[in-house]
Image: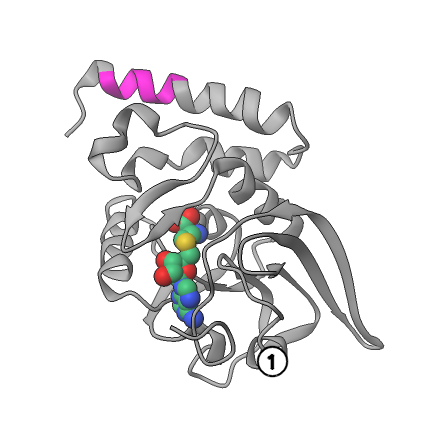
Amino acid sequence: MQQPNEKDKLVAERQAMIRTQLKKRDITDPAVLKAMADVPRENFTPNEYLDQVYYDGPLSIGYGQTISQPYIVALMTQELKIDKNCDVLEIGTGSGYQTAIIAKLAKEVFTIERIEPLSLKAQQTLKELNITNVKFLIGDGTCGWHENKKFDRIIITAAAARMPKPLLDQLKIGGIAVVPLGAEYLQELVTIEKTDSGLKTKSVCGCRFVRLIGKFGYPE
Ligand code: SAH
């Protein structure tokens, strides 16, 4: 448990993160900035990193996985253009931090994680924060959500060589996906808009994510 003055310190650090890492870059969407202000990143990071919670980069969450850099979380969320009518599919729950940010903006989040203990921990963290519009699934997210369902938005928080076909099929016409695509150690963050006349892709920036492992991703 954090001491009262520790809590104040973390709130101040979160405010500083929003000023220096987000607003000074290109995060301008007020709803995204509010979600980033409302979700305590300290609840999603291991206790040994309490002094680095608002560090401008990813942190280890165990099992060879990371909680993403706050800026990347905000940027991917901003690119998704989420509103309260959106059902969002997320592949790679990890710590649940990105899940929580999206849940603040969307109607419902459907999130898949292949590493069971990470999903269980994320489920507990979101419960503690009273975030209830999230459905969790443990398994291979490259195969899509298990029910025959279409999504307004899809976010993949692990890197693939290409967009897995089952996920593209589960994106609605008019929907947007944000995904890191490219080689194993360096990727391009890409947005894919599904229109009546096909796919419109846009490159956002360079990025580096852990591997998307599964049937339509990298082998184990
Ligand atoms: N957004 C998360 C990032 C976690 S790292 C956070 O900020 O905490 C990416 C996650 O994707 C890892 O937890 C990894 O286990 C998971 N992952 C990789 N391949 C997957 C797959 N095929 N299905 C579901 N999850 C996958």
Q: How many badges with numbers are in the image?
A: 1
In the rendered image, residue 11 lying in the magenta stretch gets the answer: yes
Main SS, magenta residues: helix
At a point 38% along the width and 48% down the height, the residue shown is 66
* Residue 189 x %, y %: 64, 53
Q: Is residue 206 left or right of residue 11?
A: right
Inspect this view and state whether residue 81 appears: no
In front of the other: 80 or 204: 204
At a point 26% along the width and 51% down the height, the residue shown is 127
* Residue 111 x %, y %: 41, 64
Q: Is residue 18 left or right of residue 53?
A: right
At a point 65% along the width and 28% down the height, the residue shown is 25
Q: Quadrant of the N terminus?
A: top left
* Residue 70 x %, y %: 48, 37
Q: Quadrant of ligand 1?
A: bottom left
Residue 198, relative to residue 20: is it above or below? Answer: below
Q: Is residue 211 left or right of residue 173?
A: left
In front of the other: 127 or 46: 46
Kindly identify the amino acid type of the residue bearing the numbered disc 1. Lys
Q: Which residues are magenta?
A: 6-12
Question: For numbered disc 1, what is the local secondary structure?
Answer: helix
* Residue under pointer 1: 165
In front of the other: 91 or 57: 57
